[in-house]
Amino acid sequence: MPYINRPNDEYIIYIDESDGGGLNFCGNCFTQLKKTLAKIFENDCPKLADLVDKQDLKKNGYVRIVELYEQNCGN
């Protein structure tokens, strides 16, 4: 199950649910994931959702979101 923990937060946020058999996206799941990321990071990394690419995420997994954050928004 994928979770996000923003820097300095003491809690984690559940961001998406896969079918348990790998990284699969249903019809609108990727769009919903991007909307969720945009909302979660609207103040500290507003461009993060735009940087997430569906094929890249399928290839590299959810850790890619962390990498994109660190490369583009981290301190």
Image (cartoon, grey):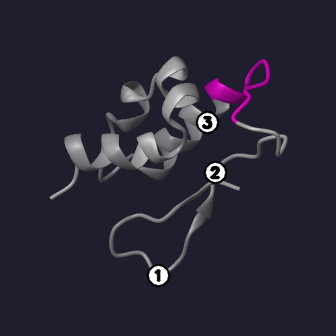
Residue sitting at x 47%, y 39%: 38
> Does 40 appear above or below 7?
above
> Does 32 appear above or below 14?
above
Report the Cα–Cα distance between label 2 and label 1.
16 Å
Place residue 26 in its image quadrant. Answer: top right
Place residue 12 in its image quadrant. Answer: bottom right
Report the Cα–Cα distance between label 2 and label 3.
7 Å
Pick whichever, 30 or 59, lies toward us.
59
Tag 2–tag 3 contact (CB < 8 Å): yes
Please state which amino acid type lies under the numbered disc 1.
Glu
Residue matched to label 1:
10
Residue matched to label 3:
33
**N-terminal label among 1 and 3:** 1
Badge 3 crowding class, 10 Å Cα cut-off, few under 14, some 14 to 19, many 20 or more, is some
Q: Secondary structure at mark 1?
A: loop
> Is 57 on the left-hand or right-hand side of 21?
left
Pick whichever, 46 or 56, lies toward us.
56
Please state which amino acid type lies under the numbered disc 3.
Leu
Residue sitting at x 82%, y 46%: 20
**N-terminal label among 2 and 1:** 1
Tag 2–tag 1 contact (CB < 8 Å): no
Q: Main secondary structure of the magenta part?
A: loop
Which residues are the magenta region?
23-31
Residue 47: x and y in percent read 32, 34
Place residue 35 in its image quadrant. Answer: top right
Q: Secondary structure at mark 2?
A: loop
Q: Secondary structure at mark 3?
A: helix
> Is 8 on the left-hand or right-hand side of 19?
left
Q: Is residue 73 at least partly visible in the picture?
A: yes
